[in-house]
């Protein structure tokens, strides 16, 4: 069966003054897959996600999401994309319910009150709905951010550390929810994470970055075999931290 790519980058670079954050990156993510972007701090993960969201434009190259050129026509597809990060706060003085209602209206979510109730149950945030967002713990905020990200039933869901600050049981529940959402909706998920066990369990494909460049790619099982390692964390340390070149058979 052939799958068309949902996300495509071709020779994409992004400069910040004299700093090259993303360096001539080319890759695609097929429709309906869960793909991870891995790399050390400063590897370019956040810049890539920001460009896919249309918050930043590439300095050079071409980037498309859902067949739309994000440099020229991103407003045609932004309503079909959403994003979750525990490091991006929602308005602190609003309640959780008020925050989610605001975002539901921004995304023109139909029957958003029913959608809110369903997500609150799935993410176990019912008891927090009328609490002021700024009073929540880090783990509670992570779950609220995921509720916000799923409100509009996105076709492309971008995730930055989706289970950060969650206890192991809750993190497992969230991973199951994300996998079910992908299977039921056919959405494409692209995530940045430092939780290598999570990537092994959840992702079909892994893109490895170093200093803004793609240095290797494969399935979690394929990368383990290629590097003769028992865990993806060991592969990550080899490639990202110690700048080991991938085996010749795995080079892109």
Image (cartoon, grey):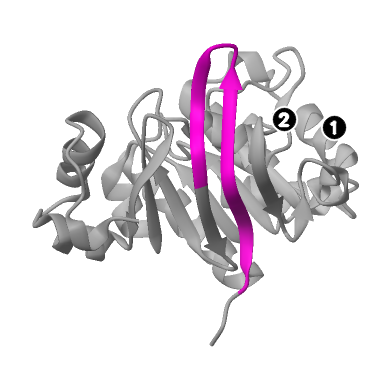
Q: Nearer the viewer, residue 18 or 161?
A: 18
- Asked whether residue 144 appears in the rendered view, the answer is no
Residue 94 on image: x %, y %: 77, 18
Residue 144 on image: x %, y %: 62, 34
Q: Over which residues does the magenta segment extend?
A: 4-25
Instruction: For marks 2 and 1, give the one nearer the viewer.
Output: 2
Residue 173 drawn in magenta: no
Q: Residue at x 60, y 41 (%)?
A: 146
Q: Residue at x 59, y 16 (%)?
A: 16
Residue on which the image places disc 2:
55
- Asked whether residue 13 appears in the rendered view, the answer is yes
Q: Which mark is residue 179?
A: none
In this view, the residue farthest toward the bottom is 1
Considering the numbered disc 2 on the image, is that residue within a helix, a strand or a loop?
loop
Residue 212 on image: x %, y %: 43, 32
For this view, does 113 lie left or right of residue 198? right
Q: Earlier in the sequence, mark 2 or mark 1?
A: 2
The rendered magenta stretch, by its main secondary structure, is classed as strand
| Residue 217 in which image quadrant | bottom left
**Which image quarter is the C terminus in?**
bottom left
Q: Residue at x 51, y 40 (%)?
A: 24
| Residue 214 in which image quadrant | top left
Q: Say few, some or many: other residues with alpha carbon within 10 Å of mark 2 (under 14 / 14 to 19 / 20 or more).
A: few
Residue on which the image places disc 1:
102
Q: Nearer the viewer, residue 82 or 21?
A: 21
Residue 23 drawn in magenta: yes
Q: Is residue 111 above or below residue 85?
A: below
Q: Is residue 94 above or below residue 22?
A: above
């Amino acid at each position: 069966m052939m799958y068309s790519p949902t996300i495509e980058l071709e020779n994409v670079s992004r400069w910040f003054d004299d700093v090259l954050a993303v360096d001539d990156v080319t890759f695609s993510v097929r429709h309906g897959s869960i793909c991870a972007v891995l790399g050390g701090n400063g590897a370019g993960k956040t810049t890539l996600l920001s460009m896919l969201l249309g918050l930043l434009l590439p300095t050079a190259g071409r980037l498309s999401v859902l067949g739309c050129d994000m440099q020229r026509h991103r407003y045609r597809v932004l309503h079909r994309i959403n994003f979750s990060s525990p490091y991006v706060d929602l308005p602190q003085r609003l309640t959780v319910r008020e925050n989610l209602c605001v975002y539901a209206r921004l995304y023109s979510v139909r029957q958003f009150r029913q959608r809110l109730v369903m997500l609150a149950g799935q993410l176990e945030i019912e008891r927090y709905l009328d609490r002021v967002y700024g009073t929540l713990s880090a783990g509670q905020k992570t779950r609220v951010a995921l509720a916000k990200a799923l409100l509009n039933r996105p076709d492309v869901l971008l995730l930055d550390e989706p289970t950060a600050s969650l206890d192991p049981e809750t993190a497992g529940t969230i991973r199951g929810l994300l996998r079910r959402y992908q299977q039921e909706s056919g959405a494409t998920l692209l995530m940045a994470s430092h939780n290598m066990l999570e990537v092994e369990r959840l992702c079909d494909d892994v893109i490895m970055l170093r200093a803004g460049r793609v240095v290797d790619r494969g399935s979690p099982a394929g990368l383990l075999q290629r590097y003769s390692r028992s865990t993806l964390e060991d592969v990550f340390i080899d490639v990202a931290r110690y700048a080991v070149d991938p085996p010749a058979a795995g080079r892109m």
